[in-house]
Image (tube, rainbow, N blue to C red):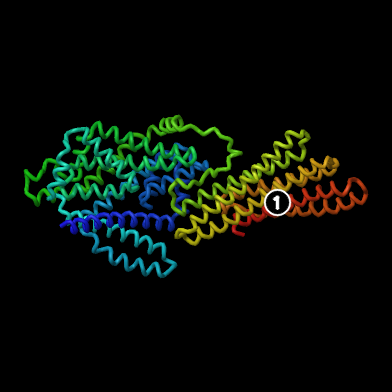
Amino acid sequence: MTQSYLLLTFRLLGSLALLMYGMKTMSDALQKMAGPQLRHILGAMTTNRFTGMLTGMSVTAAVQSSTATTVMTVSFVSAGLLSLAQAISVIMGANIGTTLTAWIMSAGFSFNITDFVWPAFLIAIILIYRKNNRVVGDFLFGIAFMFLGLGTLRQTGIDIHLGENEAVLAFFSSFDPQSYVTTLLFLLIGGVLTMCVQSSAAVMAITMILCSSGVLPIYQGIALVMGENIGTTVTSNIVALSAGTQARRAAFAHMFFNLFGVCWVLLVFRPFVDMVCSLVGYDVTLTKETTTQALFLANAAKLSFVLAAFHTCFNLINTGILIWFIPQIERLVCHVIKQEKEDEEEDSRLQYISSGIMKTPEISVLQAQKEITLFGERMQRMYGMTCDMLDERNNDKFAKIFARVEKYEGISDNMEIEIARYLEQVGDAHLSDETKWKIRLMLRQVSELESIGDACYNLARTMNRRKQSGKDFTPKQYEQLHNMMNLTNQSLSQMNHVIEGRREDQHIEETYRIENEINELRNRLKADNIQAINDHEYDYAIGTMYIDLVSECEKLGDYVVNVVQAKLGA
């Protein structure tokens, strides 16, 4: 008997694992198929709170992952493509879209769906071996695993005979169903379970087993679902602690949304649950003692649909109430989580990518691209410091600027390593060919951007060497150096313009034009320098440092061209 229960326990846990794996595989495959398009939809269709809500709902229903939608939304907020108010409306829609999962699961509990998964497995493996359709095969595998997990879970629930287990029945009957304390206790249990297993779908599946077998009264089952809604947001907030301010604000807005919903549901708990039960056709008055076993079990079989209906009604009504107060929610969130006051210029940490935030590979590429954009801006800022050094006469101020350039050189090295490491981790996942190509181009970009940092540092060291020598450039040399450095700055500005924009909207001709001007000026200045030394306008040592600066600017321009080529795939 003990061995039998042990086997059933392993079947229960294994089927839950199958369910979670199937949902993740299906979601990842869908995002590979439509990742870039989903990002464009999310950015284009959030013109107001209602389109934002509808977009969040449709995208989440499509990819079966509210986490994926939330992470995409946060990345847009961080990049300045969406306001926090628009992001809140998308998150509200994501909460509605994720209720589709509960309906899929309730359908799996209503009949034996495992008979239909075997053809799906067969078709999926054929598509996977035909490499061109691998992503579709992964999607079918995900669906098949999900429904196999649901079917096994349903059958295991039946085999355990929970409804006839006196110990289990006695445990749940020990709680007073009329007490608010019981409701709050099960709400807490649902939240803690969700935080432990990191899957609201798994907790929903467990709740459906307990309710459908007649062990768990519907009111306690609903309380578990409410706790699951809070538990999944607590996890998001803990994860977001290591992320930026906007990510933490979006996570907190998500938590506020669900907490507010739970509060008003608790005020009208029984009438609201009874209303949902009547919509589904479940009779709350039927008990084992007042009806036949067959009728009781037939009524209990509707409980999975009651849970799904409650989840949907909860999120629909909650959104219907809160969507009118998005500006107030935004102000509250900004008041609770204030912007960190730190010197962003001197901060070597990555701004947009963090190991703490859960992402899918396709979405991670967007985050990395934003980090590369920041990398380019920092390198131009570093170059501006070297320009300041050229004209600085005060020794103390000169030394401070040189120290900042040295610090930025360390920042550039750190950013290259961290971004490249992140992209390598993303590249280990199963990716679409387009995304693999993008990652290769991005690795080229970060390598060339770090070379720009090295060139800036070389410029600063040459200027420092000139300062230590006690010698100075002639007015004509200063004029020509300003011309060269202004051209180089133009090339950096054009590079950042290309990096920030969409590849399809950018051209490389302007970068080539500036580079040609830099090369022509370099050649002319080299020839003029030899002539000036021969004419004894200045000595060889100062002439060498002068040409070192000119040549380093030209090298920097070459690195700029390499970055632009990498961005455009040229």
Q: Is residue 547 left or right of residue 77?
A: right
Q: Secondary structure at mark 1?
A: helix
Screen quadrant of the C terminus? bottom right
Residue drawn at x 37%, y 37% as measured from the top left = 255
Viewer can see residue 313 = no
Q: Quadrant of residue 9?
A: bottom left
Residue 77 in the image: x percent, y percent?
Answer: 48, 41
Task: Find disc 1 in the rendering and name its residue.
Answer: 556
How many numbered badges does the structure rendering display? 1
Quarter of image, res 310: top left
What residue is at 36 percent from the left and 34 percent from the top? Answer: 322
Position of 228 relative to 432 (above/below): above
On the question of residue 38 being in view, the answer is yes
Q: Position of residue 34 (x, y in %)?
A: 43, 56
Which residue is at a point 67% across and 54% down the rendered structure image? 561
Q: Identify whether 144 is placed above or below 103.
A: below
Quadrant containing the N terminus is bottom left
Place of residue 289 in the rendered image (x, y in percent of width and height, measured from the top left): 6, 44
Question: Is 378 or 116 nearer to us in this picture?
Answer: 378
Name the residue nearer the viewer: 357 or 10.
Answer: 10
Percent from the top left, x then y, of residue 381?
Answer: 65, 42
Answer with left or right where residue 472 lies relative to residue 125.
right
Residue 479 quadrant: top right
Residue at position x 45%, y 44% in the image: 73
Dot 1 surroundings within 10 Å: few (below 14), some, or many (20 or more)?
many
